[in-house]
Image (cartoon, rainbow, N blue to C red):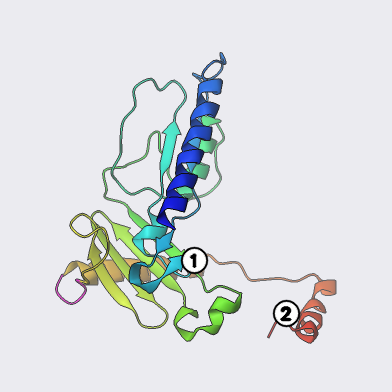
């Protein structure tokens, strides 16, 4: 399984490399913005999990992100945590588009990447047969700040990891480190803020009949 996955990555690297080489021959390449990233990682048995989804563990949430900014000529590597919500803000800034209202993402070309910001990650239960396993019928959230990562689950899981000394998340430090309380408080503040901004769900009149119809077909319980 590892070999097959490695082969896929090698092939993708080859294809992306060919694309970039082709783009570099165009006169507009220097002023372009190029972003290469992924939607998730993969688990191969870590913590008895395989595939992807239903977890905020490191193997799923640590993904590559390669950015070539307009006018950039010197490469650099950033170790600080960034988020996929930053992609939208970065593209908008490069295009000169002013975004209305506050946004959770930052412009990676000008953002604060010194590790002081917090990143929140969420995982919701699958809507397929995997949810029939009680252990997988759960929601998970993680808050990352600097080297620390707090994980909380709707099933009561609460863990703290040092992502510098323990990137595999093998030693839970939630009962021995003061950072656990700090990150727990930050996560609760984030949840309260997010829920206060959540709009009320609305349905057009003709869509209210959808739920009973879907229930009759067995698609909705």
Task: Measure the C-alpha gap from mark 2 to mark 1.
Answer: 21 Å
Check the image and report above or below for 117 versus 168: above
Q: Is residue 104 visible?
A: no
Number of numbered discs: 2
Tell me where residue 175 appears, x and y as whole percent.
18, 77
Report the residue at 59% width, 78% height from top.
Answer: 129
Q: Is residue 47 visible?
A: yes
Q: Residues within 10 Å of mark 2 (few under 14, many from 20)?
A: few
Quadrant where the C terminus sits is bottom right
Q: Nearer the viewer, residue 75 or 5?
A: 5
> Counting residues from the N terminus, which is met first, the one under dot 2 or under dot 1?
1
Position in image of residue 90 (x %, y %): 48, 38
Residue 175 lies in the magenta stretch: yes
User: Of all residues shown, which one is farthest toward the right?
Assistant: 206
Q: Nearer the viewer, residue 195 or 13?
A: 13
Pointer 1 residue: 53
> Residue 183 location in percent, x, y?
27, 66
**In magenta segment, residue 200:** no
Q: Residue furthest top?
A: 27
Res. 10 image quadrant: top left
Disc sitting over residue 23 in the figure: none
Q: Give the residue pinned by disc 2.
A: 219
Magenta stretch, overall SS? loop
Quarter-wise, where is residue 200 in the image? bottom right
Q: Residue at x 70, y 81 (%)?
A: 220
Boundaries of the magenta span: 173-177
Q: Residue at x 40, y 38 (%)?
A: 108
Percent coordinates x, y for residue 168 in the rendering: 27, 61
Secondary structure at numbered mark 1 = loop
- Horizontal side, residue 105 vs residue 151: left or right: right
Q: Residue at x 47, y 70 (%)?
A: 54
């Amino acid at each position: 399984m590892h070999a097959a996955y490695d082969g896929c990555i090698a092939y993708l690297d080859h294809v992306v490399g060919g694309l970039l080489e082709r783009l570099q021959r165009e006169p507009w390449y220097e002023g372009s913005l190029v972003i290469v990233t992924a939607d998730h990682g993969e688990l191969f048995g870590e913590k008895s999990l395989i595939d992807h989804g239903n977890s905020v563990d490191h193997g799923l949430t640590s993904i590559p992100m390669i950015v070539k900014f307009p006018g950039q000529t010197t490469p650099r590597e950033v170790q600080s945590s960034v988020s996929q919500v930053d992609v939208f803000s970065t593209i908008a800034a490069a295009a000169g588009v002013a975004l209305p209202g506050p946004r959770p993402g930052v412009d990676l070309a000008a953002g604060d990447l010194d590790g002081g910001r917090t990143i929140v990650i969420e995982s919701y239960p699958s809507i397929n047969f995997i949810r029939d396993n009680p252990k997988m019928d759960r929601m998970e959230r993680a808050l990352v700040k600097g080297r620390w990562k707090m994980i909380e689950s709707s099933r009561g899981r609460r863990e703290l990891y040092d992502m510098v000394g323990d990137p595999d998340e093998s030693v839970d430090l939630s009962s021995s480190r003061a950072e656990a309380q700090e990150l727990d408080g930050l996560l609760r503040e984030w949840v309260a803020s997010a829920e206060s901004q959540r709009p009320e769900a609305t349905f057009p009149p003709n869509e209210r009949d959808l739920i009973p119809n879907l229930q009759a077909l067995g698609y909705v319980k």
